[in-house]
Every structure is written in C-alpha cells, then in structure tokens.
C-alpha cells in the first residue's frame, strides 16, 4: 500500500485505532530528536505524543516563569512608586516638593539623571534657590528664542516619549543650552537612552514644563517597554508642582 492509500484508509475509518489500541504501542515512528526518547531512534505513537506533551509543558513552564518575573518586577516598581508618592505628600514646601520630584525620583528608581525644566513664574524663585545642587532650570532665565522652541516642543508632546540619547543631543540640546552647558556636561551617555515627560497644569493643552530622565543603558527608556509608568510620573509631578488634577 502507498502512503496515500494508508492515509485514505484511516480517514475512512476514524474508529480503527480505537478498535485496535495495541497498534498505538506497536507502530513505531522516527524520533525527531534524541531528547525525546531514551535508548533508540524510533518511538511508538504513544511515546511520540508523550514527548510532544513534555515539550509543550516545558514551554508553558517557561512562560509561567516569565510571567512571574514580570509580576515581581511590577510589584517592585509599585512599591517604589508608593514610596516616592509618600515623599511628595510629606513635602510641606514648594522647595521640598521640587527636590522630591527630582532627587527623590532619581533615588527611588535609580535613574542616573533627572532634570526638571519649567517656565512658570511662580517656580522661578524656587528654582533659583535650589541651583546648582538640584537639576532644575527655569526657562524664563534663557533667551526668548530658545525658550519659545522649548515651550513649542514640549506642548507638541501629547505623552512621554523615549529616544536614544544621541537623538537628544543632536536635536534636543536646549536643556543643556538653557543651562549654558553642553549635554555632555549633564552626564548623558551618547549610547544611552532618555525619556522626555511633558508637564501640564490639569488638562491645559499648553505644556508648563518638561522633565528629562536619562540613563547609560540604551534599553532603559524605550517605547517598546510602554509608557504607562512614565505617564503616571508626569501626572504626579504636574499635580505636585503645578496644581494639576490627576
């Protein structure tokens, strides 16, 4: 009989193997890999199915382990976020709130560089009192052209964006320029990554500030990882410093 004839026979008689279960153990097929069978290169149909099930189980175990790691990582981030929010709530003055928004965030999440820029007059005096120890900048202290570009760029951001550090240095060096320093002086590694978070007072369409997060790790800030966490940070800082409602 040819292969097609055997196949046609079995297709026409779906109960054949049920009526002859011994064939499941007697019929042998070639094993696909050595780890599926011990002691030979052929296996019975039952052994073949068992081997396939073992492979499926291993894949499922790997998937479950991966999901558990993600859950643990998300839980750790959640705990850090709660600790940072607590520090914001305990800050009784605007200066302390700014410090916790910048330094507290950097410490809680191990971000090498966090910089805050705003063009709100009510924060200019606060920022001036914190410089140079705190990475803050009042855009009101820079030239009008650079200030205008900064406000326009931040307002155009509907949500946080992540990009390679070299892109920031090439086209977004205004934060460094505004502080009369180069981006290298800010400690940004060209091979690293940055995140830009627009800050808004409530639902105002115009941005009121911008937060920069930078890391030497090129994969630390990536659109592929999602931006939900960065959106939460932007909303919290906006509410804390600008009085925006979450």
Image: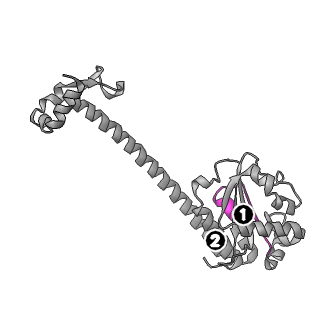
Q: Name the residue beneath numbered marker 1.
A: 103
Identify the disc placed on residue 235: 2
Identify the residue at the far top of this view. 40
User: What residue is drawn where x is 19% and y is 28%?
Assistant: 6
The total of numbered circles placed on residues is 2
Q: Residues within 10 Å of mark 2 (few under 14, many from 20)?
A: many
Q: Is residue 112 magenta?
A: yes
Q: Is residue 163 above or below residue 104?
A: above
Identify the disc placed on residue 216: none
User: What residue is drawn where x is 26% and y is 25%?
Assistant: 29
Q: Could you say which is closer to the camera, residue 71 or residue 42?
A: 42
Query: How far from the left and from the top, in percent, is residue 203?
Result: 65, 78
Image colouring? one colour
Q: Secondary structure at mark 1?
A: helix
Magenta extent? 100-119
Q: Could you say which is closer to the camera, residue 233 or residue 98?
A: 233
Where the N terminus falls, by quadrant? top left
Query: How far from the left and from the top, in percent, is residue 192?
Result: 71, 48
| Side of 86 relative to 196 (left or right) | left
Gap between marks 2 and 1, in whole Å? 17 Å
User: What residue is drawn where x is 9% and y is 35%?
Assistant: 19
Where the C terminus falls, by quadrant? bottom right
Q: Residues within 10 Å of mark 1 (few under 14, many from 20)?
A: some
Query: How far from the left and from the top, in percent, is residue 42?
Result: 27, 22
Q: Are marks 2 and 1 in contact (CB under 8 Å)?
A: no
User: What residue is drawn where x is 32% and y is 28%?
Assistant: 36
| Side of 20 relative to 100 (left or right) | left
Q: Earlier in the sequence, mark 2 or mark 1?
A: 1
Identify the residue at the far left of this view. 19
């Amino acid at each position: 009989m040819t292969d097609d004839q055997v196949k046609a026979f079995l297709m026409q008689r779906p109960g054949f193997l049920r009526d002859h279960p011994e064939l499941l153990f007697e019929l042998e097929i070639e094993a696909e890999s050595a780890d599926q069978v011990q002691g030979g290169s052929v296996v019975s149909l039952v052994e073949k199915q068992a081997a396939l099930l073992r492979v499926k189980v291993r894949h499922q175990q790997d998937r479950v382990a991966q999901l558990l790691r993600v859950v643990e990582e998300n839980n750790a981030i959640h705990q850090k976020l709660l600790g940072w929010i607590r520090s914001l709530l305990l800050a009784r003055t605007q200066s302390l709130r700014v410090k916790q928004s910048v330094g507290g965030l950097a410490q809680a999440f191990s971000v090498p560089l966090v910089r805050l820029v705003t063009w709100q007059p009510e924060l200019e005096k606060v920022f001036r009192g914190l410089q140079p120890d705190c990475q803050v900048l009042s855009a009101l202290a820079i030239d009008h052209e650079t200030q205008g570009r900064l406000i326009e760029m931040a307002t155009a951001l509907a949500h946080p964006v992540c990009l390679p550090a070299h892109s920031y240095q090439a086209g977004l060096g205004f934060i460094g320029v505004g502080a009369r320093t180069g981006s290298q002086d800010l400690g940004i590694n060209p091979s690293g990554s940055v995140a830009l978070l627009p800050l808004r007072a409530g639902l105002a369409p115009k941005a009121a500030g911008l937060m920069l997060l930078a890391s030497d790790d090129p994969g630390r800030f990536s659109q592929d990882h999602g931006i939900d966490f960065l959106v939460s940070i932007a909303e919290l800082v906006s509410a804390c410093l600008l009085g925006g409602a979450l």
